[in-house]
Image (cartoon, grey):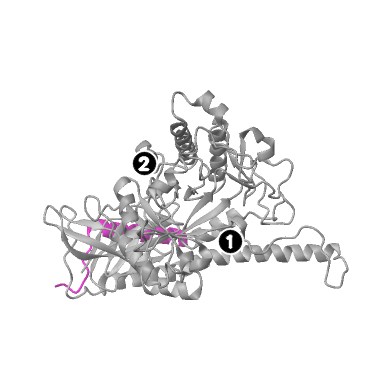
Amino acid sequence: MSSRATFSQFEQKSVYLVTLDWCVQNLLYRDMKKLVVSLVAFLVSGLFLFGFSQDFENSSAAFDVEKDSIYIPFEFRGAWLSTVESIDWPKVKIHLTRQTKEDGSVESSSEMKARISKEREQQKKDLVGLINAIKRTGCNAVMFQVVSNTDALYPSKILQWAPSLTDIPGEGPGYDPLALAVKTAHSLGMQIHAWINPLRIGKVDFPRREDNICYVKKELVQEHNGRLYWDPGNPQMREYLGNLATEIMSKYELDGLHIDDYFYPDGLKGSGEQAKSKNGEKVWNDEALFKKYGNGKTLDQWRESNIDEIVKVMHEAVHKTRPDAVFGVSPAGRLVNTQALYADPRNWARQGTIDYLIPQIYWQHGHAIADFKKVLDSWSGILEDVPVIVGMAAYRYKSKAFPEFSEYELQVKECREAPYLEGPERQNVIGQCWFTTHSIIGDEFTSKMLNTFYQDETLTPNIGNGGNILQSPEVFRMGNHLRWGEVKNADSFAVYRLEDSGQRTSSGGVVWKAVFKEKFHGFIYKCREAGNYFVLACKGGSHSQRSNVIFIK
């Protein structure tokens, strides 16, 4: 075997182009002597790569593009960052009103200004810290709750600011939390999805300004058991939610929009034509709307179709505004539970109005009604063509149902072994999402995650059109190095090496498993072992399709 690396014509041409590009950039130097010295240094380093890089011994077989296939084990590893009632954040409220000091005096204007600045910076620091902590667990996606009770964690023209941020209802914190979260997540190479509760308004006595949208549009609101809800039976509700989705997705480079399982209130279904009043309390009454818009359906059919329409409108708004983003729903863990809220994910799958589903399978193995494995298998069976991410009950750790961490280990293992569709290249259970953030970022839980099922870093799978935003890099060999050029909009690159999975294709070729090696910002990667390699271009939490495969001897 020759001690020198062998280059194809394409590889030689690419190196020449790289050299020429480098030289042109250096012509900006005024001192030509510097250019000559720099060029000599560059050519010497190039000769090192060309002539002195040794081939590896015991090289494996080269990838056969005609017969072989590649399985890339992407995995969605998300965490819900809950903001309703400040479950995860914010823990610090910004007090915009003048405060009384410990000695009984009232703070001065300058003291108030300094305190507000300090509270604001602490709020921002806490949010950035939480997202970094999620990254440290091995997760690669954040579901950030930006609308919980018809209020916003971003400057909205539709909704007022969330009261968890400041002590004055409707007043903002002086910065944009969603913009900060997007910037932080993407800088860490993570996906971020905006999570909203579409129909929940909150308790009747929740602090709101008189000009809150729920009072302005009170004809769209129902009061039920001491809480306010938007009524899905009114067609104007779809316009409101479509506008809300458009506003969020048009203002931020989000990877997706996400809604959870607050549909019709629990207990309405099967209660008769309309909910019956108990002890004089206000109950759900959509009789007039049903008469006007029922179109021959039963009450149950009509209410279910209303939820279908909401999902459809939000899906369309997301894709129209940001075609590379995705829309997903997190229903109750069992199909029968979510159907009780007039929501049937099977309809959305048939209608093509969801890009992924995250059922909240918050039960343990051996549960009498909802055994984890049985519930998991039921979802993968009825939603074959929709990616499923499993909602995991981190908040139940060390409870009677989840006394040991081994329960989570088994659940993640079963997620990864869920039914394959047409071979290992296609699997509709694509990952996990943990509820909630503060439950996983403690030292013990994080350590156990990293030492069991999240030892190796991985990228999220591209769902929908996510992979269409970036071109694949063209890779060539320089000795035992990989080299590629810039890719428009890419901010980093991920390198993979292929390993023989032991399986064979129908044509007798090898089914290769791609093993993640490294993700970084450069354009040259030194291979430390023989084998087949490819590269992905990345932007935030999204990535391109794979590059050509390069064989390093």
Q: Quadrant of the N terminus?
A: bottom left
Which segment did they paint magenta? 1-26
Could you tell me if residue 456 is visible in this image? no
Q: Secondary structure at mark 2?
A: helix
Q: Secondary structure at mark 1?
A: loop
Q: Where is mark 2, residue-wise?
A: 346
Q: On screen, 147 above or below 456? A: above
Nearest the viewer among 146 and 527 is 146
Q: On screen, 172 above or below 297? A: below
Queried whether the magenta region covers residue 179, the answer comes back as no
Q: Is residue 184 left or right of residue 505?
A: right
| Dominant secondary structure of the residues highlighted in magenta in the image | helix
- Identify residue type, mark 1: Ile
Residue displayed at 67% across by 46% down: 204
Q: Residues within 10 Å of mark 2 (few under 14, many from 20)?
A: some
Estimate the spatial distance between the alpha carbons at disc 2 and disc 1, rounded to whole Å: 31 Å
Q: Where is mark 1, residue-wise?
A: 87
Q: Residues within 10 Å of mark 1 (few under 14, many from 20)?
A: few
Q: Is residue 290 left or right of residue 118?
A: left
